[in-house]
């Protein structure tokens, strides 16, 4: 007896039409104006000296993924996955619902080129201008809840990592030790379940608000570590706890007033991603920097910074 196979006709629907009025905010802005904002030559100046030329990926798609990645606080891999699976992302990028994504290393290379360009902050500047012209901003002064618009990159990066490290610990505990997970949640003081990805809400224009957020996140880290100090940890739980300890200590310092603030220094061998802890800042010359991996193999597991 032969088994028949049903015929499946691929569908390439317009994600914007599928979502209708459910498409809102920055996603709607990019869906409506992304084509005009990020033309085919938007990144052309970054590849004038490249022997390989520009990537075959449309500039609008790359720009949209980088903006939404910053907006949601995602890793490169998560951002590329979101482009394939999320209708709002597809609508914003101007692709159809059957679109495939690209390799996440493309984002690493593009960021490195942007850093050395004449306009390294063009994505946020152009998005802000487009939103203002479209009347989306109203009386507000920003489009994205993203501090790079106002030169607060260090704060945003640290805030994202602190929250991500707590979220990662809770996720591992929920899977491996639910009792300990409840103990940790019981000492966390912020009004945050740490369930979803992304940055916490904050008035990024307000120095005091940003400072209070950093202090609150660090105190949640310390509280969680205080609970874990009383336990014997193994495997993924031990790794997540050690990652939390490193992230909580590498970028912040406590002032004489007892408030934890962003430290005006860069920790040696600083971890820059809680998703891939082997990734590091690096440089090939004084002016050419990159985010990537060290050539020499590292020991397995996490080690606290000295």
Image (cartoon, grey):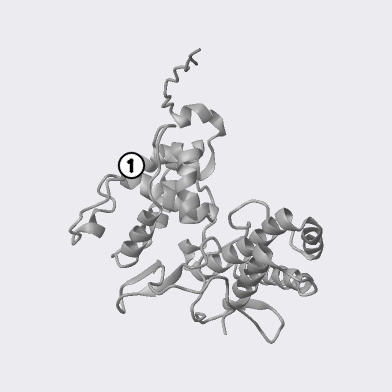
Instruction: Answer whether residue 38 is visible to the viewer in this image.
Output: no
Q: Residue 112's spot in the image, x, y percent?
A: 34, 64
Q: Nearer the viewer, residue 141 or 202?
A: 202
> Quadrant of residue 99 in the image?
top left
Number of labelled discs? Answer: 1
Q: Which residue is mark 1?
A: 36
Q: Residue furthest bottom?
A: 256
In this rendered view, identify the residue nearer to me: 32 or 174: 174
Seen at 38% across and 42% down, the residue is 34
In the image, residue 223 sits, relative to residue 88, either above or below, namely: below
Residue 164 in the image, given as x and y percentages of width and height: 61, 61
Q: Quadrant of the C terminus?
A: bottom right
The reply, left or right, for residue 110 in relation to residue 256 is left
Q: Nearer the viewer, residue 298 or 9?
A: 298
Pick out the residue farthest to the top. Answer: 1
List x then y, in percent, for residue 9. Answer: 42, 20
Can the viewer see residue 305?
A: yes
The local crowd at label 1, few if under 14, some if 14 to 19, many if 20 or more residues have their Cα within 10 Å, is few
User: Taking 136 as reference, is 202 left or right?
Assistant: right
Q: Residue at x 69, y 87 (%)?
A: 256
Which residue shows up at 38% across the image and 46% down it?
102
**104 lies above or below 96:** below
Residue at far front of view: 1
Q: Is residue 15 above or below residue 161?
A: above
Instruction: Give the structural element (helix, strand or loop) at label 1.
Output: helix
Residue 289: x percent and y percent? Answer: 35, 72
């Amino acid at each position: 007896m032969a088994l028949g196979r049903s015929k499946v006709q691929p569908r390439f629907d317009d994600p914007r039409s599928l979502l209708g009025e459910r498409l809102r905010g920055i996603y709607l802005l990019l869906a409506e104006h992304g084509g005009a904002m990020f033309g085919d030559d938007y990144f052309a100046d970054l590849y004038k000296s490249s022997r390989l030329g520009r990537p075959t990926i449309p500039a609008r798609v790359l720009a949209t993924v980088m903006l939404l990645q910053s907006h949601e606080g995602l890793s490169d891999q998560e951002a590329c996955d979101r482009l394939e699976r999320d209708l709002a992302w597809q609508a914003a990028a101007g692709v159809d619902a059957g679109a495939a994504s690209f390799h996440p290393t493309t984002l690493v290379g593009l960021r490195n080129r942007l850093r050395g360009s004449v306009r390294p902050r063009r994505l946020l500047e152009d998005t802000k201008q487009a939103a203002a012209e479209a009347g989306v901003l109203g009386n507000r002064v920003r489009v994205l809840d993203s501090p790079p618009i106002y030169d607060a990159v260090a704060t945003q990066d640290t805030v994202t990592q602190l929250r991500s490290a707590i979220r990662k610990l809770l996720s591992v505990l929920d899977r491996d030790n639910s009792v300990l997970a409840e103990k940790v949640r019981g000492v966390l003081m912020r009004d945050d379940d740490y369930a979803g990805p992304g940055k916490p809400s904050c008035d990024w224009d307000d120095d005091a608000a940003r400072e209070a957020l950093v202090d609150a996140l660090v105190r949640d880290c310390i509280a969680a570590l205080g609970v874990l100090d009383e336990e014997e940890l193994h495997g993924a739980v031990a790794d997540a706890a050690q990652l939390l300890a490193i992230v909580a200590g590498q970028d912040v310092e406590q002032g004489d007033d007892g408030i934890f603030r962003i430290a005006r220094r860069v920790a040696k061998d600083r971890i820059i991603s809680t998703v891939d802890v082997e990734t590091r800042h690096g440089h090939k010359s004084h002016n050419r920097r990159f985010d990537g991996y060290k050539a020499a193999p590292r020991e397995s597991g996490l080690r606290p910074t000295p």
